[in-house]
Image: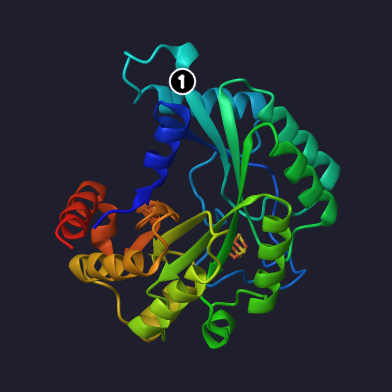
Amino acid sequence: MEYISLSDYLKEKYNTKVYKLSLTSGCTCPNRDGTISTGGCIFCSEGGSGDFAAKGLSIEKQIADAKSLVDSKISSKIPPEERKYIAYFQSFTNTYGDQERLIKLFDEVLSFKEIVGLSIGTRPDCLTDEMVNYLSLANKNKEIWVELGLQTIHENTARLINRGYELNVFEDAYKRLTDAGLKVVVHIILGLPGETEDDMLATVKYLATFNPTLFGVKLQLLHVLKGTKLSEMYEENPFHIFELEEYCNLVVKCLKLLPRETIIHRLTGDGPKKLLIAPMWSGNKKLVLNTMRKIVAKS
Ligand code: SF4
């Protein structure tokens, strides 16, 4: 089966492969700092659901470091002046905190010529009008994606995972963002404890109803990571963890439910290997990609 991957979209739009630079905004999260709760979502590791970006460095240094990391993998056939990047703020809640500081930070990032867009991971309950207005204006020059961690539409699961907001909060944020012309990417998790396959597919069907404004979806395999509440639950009462092929088959079902034009930003996701408890196969990126490719191709 065919679908539009993020790299297809970027290649078509920018006429070259575009690379992501993982950056950190210095934000925390209201679901961890005590504003909503102190525990955070039960699957969230200490790195705030993104354990790759450097902390405590200036944004110029972060960009330089992230670029040299990425550049080491880029073919020397693409000269440095032709390379393009998306700045990606994934960890924690990147619109939470001093709005003036964050706007200045995003402005600074967007001032780099080679950075063609900005991807901001956040919570739907952390979007001030000031931020939405700023992002909407910035979006006129370079593309801005706002990534909302929905995970599930089911309120009982949302409570179990301590998401800390209800579905109508997501709906309101989605509307405000799309009304402002912004591109929204929705992050969902497959394999949350207590959810059946039908529950997961219901979340995907729900997202499909947002078309034509649904820009992107990120499908994330549930990872059980060390040091999380989820790992304690898993040890006390092990719940079902997907086998690789089982997961790939489910992903195919999800892709079939989504509108053809929705951009698929991710099919699995890889957690930090040093923290991974289950499923261990997800640490073998090559195996996962090859198996996924085969199963998607024959579907
Ligand atoms: S909202 Fe994000 S950063 Fe905050 S606890 Fe949940 S997963 Fe972690």
Q: Amino acid at mark 1?
A: Arg
Give the quadrant of residue 89: top right
Query: Could one spot residue 153 in this view of the protein?
Result: yes
- Give the residue furthest to the front: 212
Tell me what residue is drawn at x 41 percent, y 34 percent.
12
The number of discs equals: 1
The image position of residue 143, as x and y in percent, is 61, 38
In what quadrant of the picture does the C terminus appear?
bottom left
Name the colour scheme.
Answer: rainbow
Q: Is residue 202 above or below residue 17?
A: below
Indicate which quadrant contains ligand 1.
Answer: bottom right
Q: Position of residue 55 (x, y in %)?
A: 61, 39
Q: Residue at x 69, y 44 (%)?
A: 26
Residue shown at 72% from the left, 57% from the top? 179
Q: Which residue is mark 1?
A: 83
Is residue 30 left or right of 160 when viewed as pictured?
A: right
Q: Secondary structure at mark 1?
A: loop
**From what the image shows, is residue 8 above or below residue 199?**
above
